[in-house]
Amino acid sequence: MVLATGNRGKLAEIMEIVRPMGIEVVPQSEFAVPEIEESGLSFVENAILKARNAARHSGLPALADDSGLEVDALNGAPGIYSARYAGDERDDQANNRLLLSRLAGIPDENRTARFQCVVVLLRHPDDPVPLICHADWEGRIVDQPRGENGFGYDPLFAVAGMRCTSAELSAEEKNRIGHRGRALAMLARQLPAWMAR
């Protein structure tokens, strides 16, 4: 299947997660799939848009993910705009700086947040029954980046029940307990029955 993402961090993470599941994915860049505007109003809508676009241009079943960070003190922002929070250039450091500036003065106990991930699998671009799986990951936003691993908001996301940020976890641990890894594990469990329909 074709993997509908142009985000290098997400691409590496998804390929690492699905490899042991026996799912073979090929990045959409190998098919010159053009980026599509994420014009949906939800993670589900955007994931479906990306999967349809990749399936249409590649002729293969398409797997897409739409994910982001919701911060309670910011009424769920950055949400579906997480990747381009600080502008269309999708700069992780700029996004993190903007997030910290908007949370300035907010006490630690009010900095609760969660990552959301929706993964969608389509057999073909007009598939009326996509396989959709969702997982979230609870935590809070720390006041300065910590850790060298991961990408995006990982250095600011303190994992609930742990004394570390997502960026301080190993890739294996993050993939096991994180939002994307759990959503993809759910998809892998449902895949045989879905493909048999």
Image: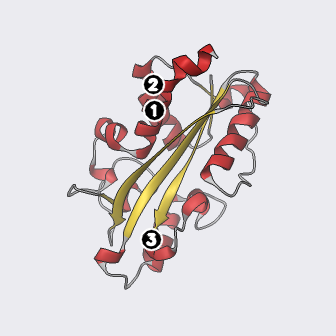
Q: Tell me if I can see residue 169 in this picture.
A: yes
List the single residue furthest toward the bottom: 105
For the residues marked 3 and 2, what is the alpha-carbon distance in whole angstroms?
Answer: 31 Å
Crowding at label 3, few (<14), some or many (≥20) Cα neighbours within 10 Å? some
For the residues marked 2 and 1, what is the alpha-carbon distance in whole angstroms?
Answer: 5 Å
Residue to which mark 1 is pinned: 186
For the residues marked 1 and 3, what is the alpha-carbon distance in whole angstroms?
Answer: 26 Å
Residue to which mark 2 is pinned: 189
Look at 20% across and 58% down and name the residue there: 163
User: Where is 32 relative to 147, above or below?
Assistant: above
User: Where is 77 relative to 152, above or below?
Assistant: below
Look at 29% across and 76% down and name the residue there: 108
Look at 27% across and 51% down and name the residue there: 168
On screen, residue 151 versus residue 68, left or right, reads: left
- Asked if disc 2 and disc 1 are in contact, CB closer than 8 Å, the reply is yes
Residue 31, image x and y in percent?
A: 72, 26
User: Where is 159 relative to 127, above or below?
Assistant: below
Q: Nearer the viewer, mark 3 or mark 2?
A: 2
Looking at marks 1 and 3 on the same chain, the residue that comes earlier in the sequence is marked by: 3
Residue to which mark 3 is pinned: 72
